[in-house]
Amino acid sequence: MKTKSTPTLHPRNRHQAIDGVAYKFDDLVQANPDLTRYIIERSNGHKTIDFADPNAVRELNRSLLLAYYGVHFWQIPEQVLCPPVPGRADYIHHLADLLASSNNGVIPSGKKVKGLDVGTGANLIYPIIGRHEYQWSFVGSELNPLSFDCATTLVKSNPSLKSHVKVKRQTNPEYIFEGIVQPEQTFTFTMCNPPFHRSAEEALAANTQKVENLAKSKSLPAQAAQSLNFGGQNSELWCDGGEIEFVCKMIRESIQIRQQVLWFSSLVSKKDSLKVIESELKKANVQEYRIIDMGQGHKISRFVAWTFIPAKEHSIWFDHKAQ
């Protein structure tokens, strides 16, 4: 089943463009003065940054988190993935709507709503946004030692996260949920930004093309296309089989903990991946699945969500299962 696509950011997303202006740079500079050196003023008076410059992108997203999401400290190494905050916030808000559909139309909030962020990364982006916007609690799983250490530091360094976010190390790369989800432990939802590409070469080609497109569309210097936007380590950007194999593996593993999670979910970057993923969901005999489109400017992204819990039992979940 497919929902109607959304042409713009989610209505509750804090980063809606107003009069064609996407970012309030005065507020962002106040939260993070380091952003000042990267701001470019256009001929029409609007301010922007060079989106092909990874340092500028990192400082912009750091500024957004410091200004709007209740964190006092956010630093990540240059070699790890720097997520675009507005798009990541959209996933959280659409997930909130999904949970509301299981809760008599009311968005559930508070620490009893527990999410599992699979591959939370050094940036810890989903727990930060989900905690601030809906007061949810999170477990973030992470395979990479550097990313695990960075995410752990972020939790320890921010009072708003300390008691509500836990980072757990996945020590076995063969598993997604095993070793993380304990027997009798329940989660209201899981979420994931999977490695999209099938190889390092494919990831490099895609990222290079993205930066070249940014340079052209923003009328930026040609040399900007030589640097890679957003960064990322191998485990963040690619895996054998790409996102299709990763999400299908997640679906197969979810069968083992089908009564411990209300909604499983994962981003799906490529529309062409959906056919195989939907086939895997049908083989898993899920009770229901949804493909939820998210609009970000001219770009449409999406996530797939599935549940093994019968619809009539969903509202009971919030009364008895959340712990």
Image (cartoon, rainbow, N blue to C red):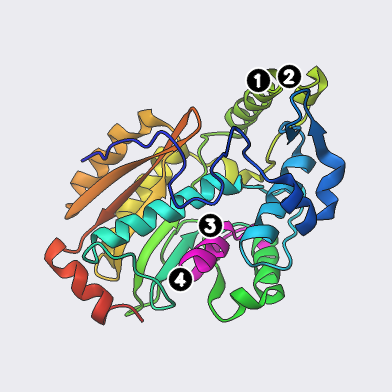
CB contact under 8 Å: marks 1 and 3? no
* Residue that label 3 marks: 119
> Mark 4, mark 2: which one is toward the viewer?
2
Q: CA distance from mark 2 to mark 1?
A: 6 Å
Residue type of the residue flagged with mark 4: Trp
> Mark 3, mark 4: which one is toward the viewer?
4
* Residue that label 4 marks: 136
Residue type of the residue flagged with mark 2: Ser
Marked residue nearer the N-terminal end (4 or 1): 4
Q: CA distance from mark 4 to mark 1?
A: 38 Å
User: In this rendering, does residue 237 appear at all?
Assistant: yes
Q: Give the crowd class for mark 4: few <14, some 14-19, many >=20 residues within 10 Å.
A: many
As drawn, 158 above or below 98: below
| Residue at horizontal 61 percent and vertical 62 percent from the top | 69
Q: Give the residue at the far right of this rendering.
A: 37
How far across and down, in percent of the image, does residue 126 sit? 53, 58
Marked residue nearer the N-terminal end (4 or 2): 4
* Residue that label 1 marks: 217
* Residue that label 2 marks: 219
Q: Give the crowd class for mark 2: few <14, some 14-19, many >=20 residues within 10 Å.
A: few
- Numbered disc 4: secondary structure: loop
| Residue at horizontal 82 percent and vertical 21 percent from the top | 223
Label placed on residue 144: none
